[in-house]
Amino acid sequence: MTQTAAQPISGLPQARERVFSGIQPSGASHLGNYLGAQANYVAMQAEYDAIYAIVDYHALTTVHDGEELRRLTHEMVLDLLAVGLDPDRCALIRQSDMPEHAELCWVLNTVVPVSWLERTPTYKEKRQQGVDNSMGLLDYPVLQAADIVIYKATRVPVGKDQAAHLELSREIVRAFNRRYGSVFPEPQAVYTESPVVLGIDGATKMSKSAGNTIPIFAEPDEIRRLVMSMVTDPLRIKRTDPGRPEVCNVCGNLHRFFGGDYLQIQDGERTARTGCVETKQLLADRIIAFFEPMRERRAELAATPGIVEEVLAAGAAKVRPLLVETMREVHDAVGIGTR
Ligand code: TRP
């Protein structure tokens, strides 16, 4: 069997490569989410045939309250629209509106050795954090592979933490194609300029579970309070001590994304011309100004009844033909269903 090229989403030019990414509905979007992945989602919708899914099936591995999951999913759609995803240029979907993702996951399960999943780093980490050792948790990366390949997407914008999952997706594709012929293309991860953003502690990755985030839609006062509490160079004790931008999350990293003068800012810190407090004040001002229009947009969207379901229904309608076609090929290749 030969691999058929992915069909374009109707209305979009044919030659564009397809992009897919999944987003966990895991609570308020923060600077790490934005700089690590969301900024790329927005940038890529212009050049690619992009599909973005809120992965509520995946979230079932950790969110065990139905009302809460529904709320988180709704909020994440608002966040993504507010940061600039445009439903006219991309498809924004809810994973569970497409039960075929779960069906394809099952088919892929039959080619994936359990040992591949047991040695996945994220699985081991989540076990250590005390997440229930469910079949769903173990199988998580296979559902992720299904999400991507059901649309034959070849580019996957994600944070660096997803590198192992993407490698696994590629291995799963190879295992399937070896057994059944070349049905799926191998997807490739695409990282942002800042794939890892450190948290307020300046030491560990910004994440909700670590409790060190700066939520991008928080009130300006709250953003300022959090930025002012950020750890800078721990060896810069006195105002007159020179700082080290290489180890400082504020001047060495975050300022790079909020103003073109970051080299001067770094120089100011290195020579002790400026102090951490003023540099943090400036960063807080810039972060607040940068996200202000998005915060306003989000408030407008949140006040528009039915907007979320409308966007999701439009997204589902756009991508459904693609997935139906892939599942027909899969059924045909593995020998299930009628021809
Ligand atoms: N595992 C991803 C995360 O936690 C979410 C995800 C699910 C995903 N399916 C995907 C990402 C497919 C990229 C492609 O961020």
Image: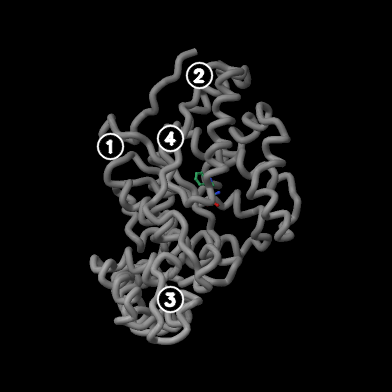
Foreground disc of the pair 1, 4 = 4
Label 3 to label 2: alpha-carbon separation: 47 Å
Colour mapping used in the image: one colour
Lower sequence index among marks 3 and 2: 2
Label 1 neighbourhood size at 10 Å, few (<14), some (14-19), many (20+)?
A: few
Looking at the picture, which amino acid does disc 4 mark? Answer: Ala
Residue corresponding to mark 4: 153
Lower sequence index among marks 2 and 4: 4
Lower sequence index among marks 3 and 4: 4
Lower sequence index among marks 2 and 1: 1
Quadrant of residue 317 within the rendered picture: top left
Residue corresponding to mark 2: 182
Q: Of the numbered discs in the image, which one, if any, rests on residue 245?
A: none
Comparing 225 with 316, the one in front is 225
State the residue at coordinates (36%, 56%): 39
Foreground disc of the pair 2, 1 = 2
Looking at the picture, which amino acid does disc 2 mark? Answer: Ser
Contact flag, marks 1 and 3 (Cβ < 8 Å):
no
Label 2 neighbourhood size at 10 Å, few (<14), some (14-19), many (20+)?
A: some
Q: Is residue 289 left or right of residue 332?
A: left
Find numbered disc 4 in the image and state the secondary structure of the residue it sits on.
loop
Label 4 neighbourhood size at 10 Å, few (<14), some (14-19), many (20+)?
A: many
Looking at the picture, which amino acid does disc 3 mark? Answer: Ala
Residue corresponding to mark 1: 12
Lower sequence index among marks 1 and 3: 1
Any part of residue 28 in sight: yes
Residue corresponding to mark 3: 218
Q: Is residue 67 above or below residue 116?
A: below
Comparing 80 with 247, the one in front is 247
